[in-house]
Image (cartoon, rainbow, N blue to C red):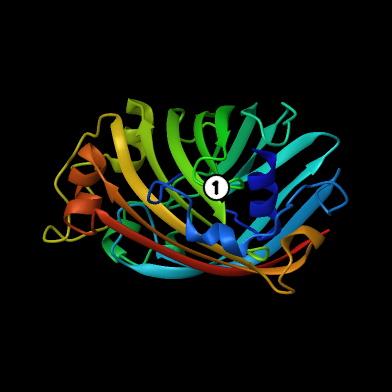
Amino acid sequence: MKLAATCAAATMLAASVPANAQDQGEPSVTTELPEDLSLEGTVFDGDFLSVGVGVAYGASYSGSDDYTTFVLPIVQGSLGGVDINPRPAGLALDFIPDTEGQLAFSAGPVIRLNRDRVDADDIEDPVVAAYGELDTAIEIGPSVGVSLPGVLNPYDSLSFNVDAAWDVAGAHDGMTINPSVTYFTPLSRGIAASLSFSANHIDDDYADYYYSVPAINTLLTDADVLPGFEADGGFESVGVNVLLGVDLNGDVTDGGLALVGLGGYSRLLNDAKRSPFTSIRGDADQWFAAIGIGYTF
């Protein structure tokens, strides 16, 4: 549903995401919504762009129990009929036009950067850092999805999406598949929220690159050397994100400044969890929080 997508953009709902439901029946939130949230004559009637920046707090690498802060850029919009949707460290394009109030499909390319353990200075754990820096992966592939409008109120949506991406930079040389489901709803004319669930499946090449551990490391003492481990592919993680966006002048349809807050939790699974980088030096439970500001024009 384009209304849900554009309201999300206006409030800088930047984490590409997935879903939740409320009680059956007419939610009380609908009494706070205007009778007409049509896109006609609003900032979303045609081309628009939302840009912003946030400060995030998360694990220093996948599986770490050390946390660090970092800057999170945000871009979303629609230009020339092509929708631009954010992804973690990347974006996806949607080339299929939507019709307001109808079942909407999306399809296009996704591209993202994977910089996990790229800079040893950013790895808080000295033992993990001693196993060396990894290369930046550039992951590219298709993204497809479908969105159902008007699930619990006239303005919400339930969306299903799948991204598949392959590394084209020669880092891990593997692929990932990321399915997600998202429930989005405006809470008023100036506030919107979403709840999302997602999973990540990795192949053997990806698992080996990020989670395998060599049995020998001459940079460490015998007491610090981790046991050798060969990681295989499978489901790497499952997670949930909660997002809230607030337009600062109380009207999401006219663009301008907005605040966004995001909180998330994910759990590493299978060999991503069993890897000594996680099981001995880190933690399978991963937490994430971010707050940012954006502008839509």
In the displayed structure, 280 sits above or below 46; it is below
In the displayed structure, 150 sits above or below 217; it is above
In the displayed structure, 28 sits above or below 267; it is below
Q: Nearer the viewer, residue 255 or 221?
A: 255
Q: Nearer the viewer, residue 38 or 64?
A: 38
Q: Residue furthest bottom?
A: 249
Task: Indicate the amino acid at tag 1.
Answer: Asn
Q: Quadrant of the N terminus?
A: top right
Residue 139 visible in the snapshot = no
Residue 13: name its quadrant.
bottom right
Expressed as whole percent of the image width and height from the top left, the position of residue 106 reads: 63, 28
Residue 158 visible in the snapshot = yes
Q: Judge left or right: residue 179 versus residue 32.
A: left
**Residue drawn at 22 percent across, 46 percent down:** 273
**Residue drawn at 55 percent across, 52 percent down:** 185
Expressed as whole percent of the image width and height from the top left, the position of residue 77 reads: 75, 47
Q: Judge left or right: residue 44 versus residue 12.
A: right
**Residue drawn at 56 percent across, 44 percent down:** 113
At mark 1, the secondary structure is loop
Q: Quadrant of the C terminus?
A: bottom right
Expressed as whole percent of the image width and height from the top left, the position of residue 102 reads: 66, 30
Mark 1 neighbour density, 10 Å: few (under 14) some (14–19) many (20 or more): some
Residue 84: name its quadrant.
top right
Q: Judge left or right: residue 204 versus residue 291.
A: left
According to the picture, the residue beneath numbered tag 1 turns out to be 153
**Residue drawn at 77 percent across, 58 percent down:** 253
Expressed as whole percent of the image width and height from the top left, the position of residue 241 reads: 42, 54
Q: How many numbered marks have been drawn onto this rendered protein structure?
A: 1
